[in-house]
Image: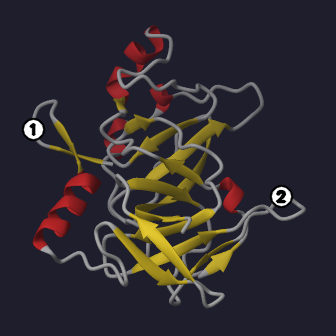
């Protein structure tokens, strides 16, 4: 989730992109200004949105769907996880530090994440809280994502307004995947990740890692969160 700028320096692709578009005045959100706005809810009411520091959603679902279930398996990164990540070449150092990254998040050896440059990322927070989110893929579409409270079976439904699909609001340049052991008690280590498999092309699948089961997640950029009136 970061764009490297020579040597060891790194900058957040997402953060710079959003900032540049805002400054240029070309990032137009339907019924959305830079402080607070109102969007029509499905029941005919209105939801107010407040701009927050840019956040990111890890989502699972049919890219062509406009709604679905299973949002209890979606997560939220309150901060851009890219600049907070650890390079694969520094994995031994991460282990020697007890799994505590320089950004103070904890590496989980049986449940870990990679992004498109091969950086080990912190886990998102699960589950994504029920709310309304203004989301975009930083392409052509911005839409309101509604995450409903869990039903009696614990399922959380999600839906996008204005006919937007999950693909429409996916940031293709950001790739992310979750890696867990392929067998109970088996080894699933970032040390087995092939550095030559990175970077991953926009929209491409994340590479497999020996000994691991991989789950690719779509990444949505959150530019506003619904607030109580």
Mark 2 or 1: in front is 2
- Disc 1 residue crowd, few under 14, some 14–19, many 20+, Cα 10 Å: few
Residue 194 numbered tag: none
Instruction: List the single residue furthest toward the front.
Output: 229
- Disc 2 residue crowd, few under 14, some 14–19, many 20+, Cα 10 Å: few
Q: Is residue 8 left or right of residue 2?
A: left
The residue that appears at 83% across and 58% down in the rendered structure is: 154
- What residue does disc 1 label? 6
Q: Position of residue 26 (x, y in %)?
A: 18, 77
- What residue does disc 2 label? 154
Name the foreground residue: 60 vs 23.
23
The residue that appears at 46% across and 49% down in the rendered structure is: 207
The residue that appears at 84% across and 65% down in the rendered structure is: 151
Q: Determine the image quadrant of residue 97.
A: top left
Q: Position of residue 8 (x, y in %)?
A: 16, 30
Q: Is residue 168 visible in this depiction of the protein?
A: no
Q: Position of residue 127 (x, y in %)?
A: 65, 50
Q: Is residue 28 above or below residue 195?
A: below
Name the foreground residue: 136 vs 46.
46
Q: Position of residue 88 (x, y in %)?
A: 37, 29
């Amino acid at each position: 989730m970061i764009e490297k700028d020579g040597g060891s320096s790194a900058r957040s692709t997402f953060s710079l992109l959003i900032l540049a578009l805002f400054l240029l005045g070309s990032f137009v959100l339907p019924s959305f200004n830079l402080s607070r706005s109102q969007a029509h809810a499905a029941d005919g009411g209105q939801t107010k949105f407040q701009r927050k520091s840019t956040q990111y959603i890890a989502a699972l679902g049919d890219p062509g769907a406009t709604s679905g279930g299973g949002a209890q398996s979606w997560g939220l990164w309150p901060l851009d996880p890219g600049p907070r990540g650890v390079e694969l070449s520094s994995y031994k150092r991460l282990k020697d530090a007890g799994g505590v990254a320089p950004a103070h998040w904890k590496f989980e050896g049986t449940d870990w994440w990679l992004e498109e440059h091969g950086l080990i990322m912190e886990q998102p927070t699960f589950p994504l809280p029920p709310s309304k989110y203004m989301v975009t893929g930083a392409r052509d579409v911005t839409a309101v994502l509604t995450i409903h409270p869990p039903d009696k079976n614990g399922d959380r439904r999600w839906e996008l307004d204005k006919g937007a699909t999950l693909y429409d609001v996916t940031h293709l340049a950001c790739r992310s995947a979750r890696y867990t052991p392929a067998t109970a008690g088996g080894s699933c280590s970032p040390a087995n990740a092939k550095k030559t498999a990175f970077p991953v092309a926009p929209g491409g699948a994340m590479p497999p890692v020996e000994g691991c089961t991989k789950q690719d997640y779509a990444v949505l950029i959150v530019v506003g969160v619904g607030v109580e009136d």
